[in-house]
Image (cartoon, helix red, strand yellow):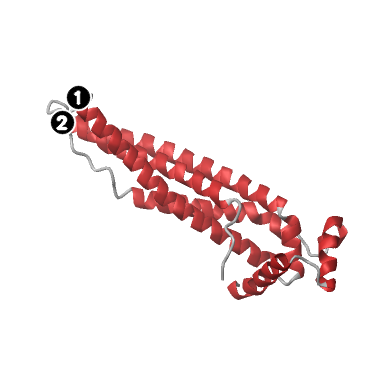
Amino acid sequence: RATRRPSWSTPTILVAALSMAFGAGLLSLVELLVAIVSADQNFGQLGAIRIMLGIVTGVFIAISIYVAGVVTVNTVATVVAGQTREIALARLLGATAASRRRRLARDGLAAGGIGAVIGLVFGAGLVAIGARLAITADVIPAVSAPMLVPAMIPLAIAVALTTWISAWIGSRRVLEVAPIRTERDLPPVAAELEPLVGGHMDQRTERRLQVEAQAEPQNR
């Protein structure tokens, strides 16, 4: 069954990718700085430097993930608010608010995972290219530093989980949409409900809503 990509998935993927790219870039940059410092035989404070850089990096990464989560919450909440009519129609056809919300959360997890992978490649690759150019220009000594570090794995998981939780929080407005709102609070929808009986509703819209309503109980 073909499914539509949520309208908020593209900006959510972009936000997750930027957050992950920032974190991955910082981790790669720390490894590069440590390698540069290690090349100086007269410098004996390598351990202290690594600890300080690790603390600063952790703080900035935490801030970037938090900001990404806030942006995702607001994005999902705004889109859900604009889809009240469609959600109410789906509720009338048998969909539940809980299943609808779980579907949004799953879409958020998928968007976060895709964004994390894109951001990891982009962030680490950007630092690698910058380091190569700096070495070529004799700005920094020729050192070898890993651009991909184990810490990027839990970071990617954190970004994906944050997007998932943010989508769940942002979709709480779905619980406020009741089927009765279609007739009571949204008069324009009455024009869409009447063709359900007369058979004049756009067939694609009717078929999509019916398929979604039938599929959601199976996911509960």
Real-space CA distance between mark 2 and mark 1, rounded to the nearest whole angstrom: 14 Å
- Left or right, 132 with respect to 93, comes to left
Q: Earlier in the sequence, mark 2 or mark 1?
A: 2
Q: Is residue 205 above or below residue 108?
A: below
Amino acid under disc 1: Asp
Task: Measuring from the top left, give residue 52's x and y in whole percent.
Answer: 32, 33
Name the residue rendered at 28%, 38% in the picture.
Answer: 128
Amino acid under disc 2: Ala
Q: Residues within 10 Å of mark 1 (few under 14, many from 20)?
A: few
Name the residue rendered at 37%, 46% in the picture.
Answer: 120
Task: Measuring from the top left, give residue 161's x and y in whole percent.
Answer: 48, 54
Query: Which residue is the site of mark 1?
Result: 138
Name the residue rendered at 72%, 61% in the picture.
Answer: 87
Name the residue rendered at 41%, 48% in the picture.
Answer: 118
Q: Quadrant of the C terminus?
A: bottom right
Query: Which residue is the site of mark 2?
Result: 39
Foreground of the two, 57 or 126: 126
- Left or right, 168 with respect to 137, comes to right
- Left or right, 200 with respect to 48, comes to right
